[in-house]
Image (cartoon, rainbow, N blue to C red):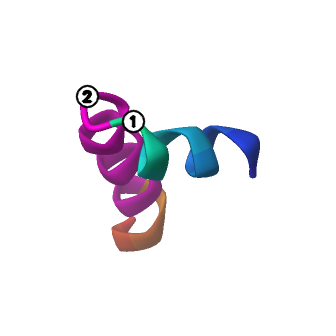
Amino acid sequence: SPARTVGWRDPGFIHTSFLKDLWPNLA
């Protein structure tokens, strides 16, 4: 996913991307 790559690259987006990626995984 492009958003995932951007999240890992951006220190600020990593938090949002990480949470967004974890929420669906946990749910």
Q: Which residue appears at 75% of the width and 52% of the height?
A: 1
Please state the extent of the stretch shown in magenta in the rendering.
Answer: 11-23
7 w.r.t. 22: above or below: above
Dominant SS in magenta = helix
25 w.r.t. 8: above or below: below
Disc 1, SS: loop
Q: Nearer the viewer, residue 16 or 27?
A: 16
Q: Which residue appears at 34% of the width and 52% of the height?
A: 18
Q: Mark 1 belongs to which amino acid?
A: Asp
Q: Nearer the viewer, residue 3 or 24?
A: 3
List the residue tagged with mark 2: 12
Are the residues at dot 2 and dot 1 in contact (C-beta closer than 8 Å)?
yes
Asked if the magenta segment contains residue 14, the reply would be yes
On the image, the x and y values in percent for residue 2 come to 74, 42
Q: Which residue appears at 33% of the width and 43% of the height?
A: 14
Disc 2, SS: loop
Side (left or right) of 5 relative to 19? right
On the image, the x and y values in percent for residue 9 come to 46, 45
Q: Residues within 10 Å of mark 2 (few under 14, many from 20)?
A: few
Side (left or right) of 20 relative to 2? left
Asked if the magenta segment contains residue 20, the reply would be yes
17 w.r.t. 22: above or below: above
Q: Mark 2 belongs to which amino acid?
A: Gly
Residue furthest toward the top? Answer: 12
List the residue tagged with mark 1: 10
Q: Nearer the viewer, residue 19 or 25?
A: 19
